[in-house]
Amino acid sequence: DVKVTQSSRYLVKRTGEKVFLECVQDMDHENMFWYRQDPGLGLRLIYFSYDVKMKEKGDIPEGYSVSREKKERFSLILESASTNQTSMYLCASSLAGGGINEQFFGPGTRLTVL
Amino acid sequence: AQKITQTQPGMFVQEKEAVTLDCTYDTSDQSYGLFWYKQPSSGEMIFLIYQGSYDEQNATEGRYSLNFQKARKSANLVISASQLGDSAMYFCAMREEHGSGNTGKLIFGQGTTLQVKP
């Protein structure tokens, strides 16, 4: 079974802290994605990566950065957490190319910034 | 710009009845894919069904079918014989497909919360 794991299900941080969210997939997928999910807004893409060390901004990259040093691992970094970054964060991975190649999601990390 | 619209924030359906969840999309591309995902209260996103823009037949997966009307740019999800376990949030999503330039990016709608009544 495809498995995408995220380092924490729940996380509470203070304003100004540096926050790392880790995501690991075990299916040798080329593509990896970070989304945030907020009520009424659906999922919005923060960053994605289509290869090791490659990254591209999504729709809402401000306040975030990412790192992909190994194919299986994609990290989301909040350099200085703010209360408006309180949200559910979802990581996903997929094979490259068209056709079905659906995205497989991790369980999510619910981040609260106080 | 590409956009997915789900106009039903919440829906109710009686157990064993069919229900249609609406999804309209906007794109100028000819090649694209449409997806539906289910998100139960536990939070995980579960892939349900896929429709390619060049597929002539509507996709079906068990009790799920996708009513694809290309000219109207709609991709409604039909769930037949609803079960209590179908209570969840449902997301419609679109992926543009440009061959070698395909990054797999998805654009999601706002979601529809479905509640199945016993």
Image (cartoon, coloured by chain):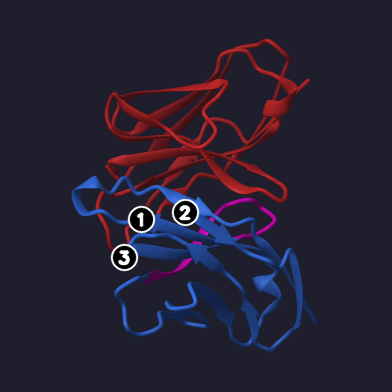
Query: Regarding mark 2 in the picture, which secondary structure is present there?
Result: loop
Q: Identify the residue shown where x is 45% and y is 79%.
A: B68
Amino acid at dot 1: Glu
Circle number at residue B60 = none
Mark 3 chain: B
- Residue positioned 70% across, 56% down in the render: B41
Respond whether the residues carrying marks 2 and 1 are from the same subunit.
yes
Q: Nearer the viewer, residue A26 or A63?
A: A63
Per the rendering, the mark at residue B2 is 2
Question: Nearer the viewer's eye, disc 2 or disc 1?
Answer: 2
Q: Position of residue A26 (x, y in %)?
A: 34, 42
Number of residues whose C-alpha sits closer than 10 Å to that of mark 2, classed few (under 14), some (14–19) or many (20 or more): few
Upstream in sequence: badge 3 or badge 1 = 3
**Chain assignment, label 2:** B
Question: Residue B23, how many percent across, how many down?
Answer: 57, 69
Q: State which quadrant residue B92 falls in.
A: bottom right
The image quadrant where one finds the C terminus of chain A is top right
User: Which residue has dot 1 on it?
Assistant: B96
| Residue depicted at x 28% and y 49% | B102
Residue position marked by numbered label 3 in the rendering: B30
- Both labels 2 and 3 in a single chain: yes
Type of the residue with mark 2: Gln
Residue B110 against residue A32 in the figure, above or below: below
Q: Secondary structure at mark 1?
A: strand
- Residue B111 position, x and y percent, is 64, 59
Magenta highlight on residue B50? yes
Marks 2 and 3 sit apart, C-alpha to C-alpha, by: 12 Å
Density class for disc 3 (Cα within 10 Å; few <14, some 14-19, many ≥20) is few
Mark toward the start of the polypeptide (2 vs 3): 2
Counting residues from the start of the chain, the first of labels 2 and 1 encountered is 2
- Stretch of the chain drawn in magenta: B39-51
Chain A pictured colour: red
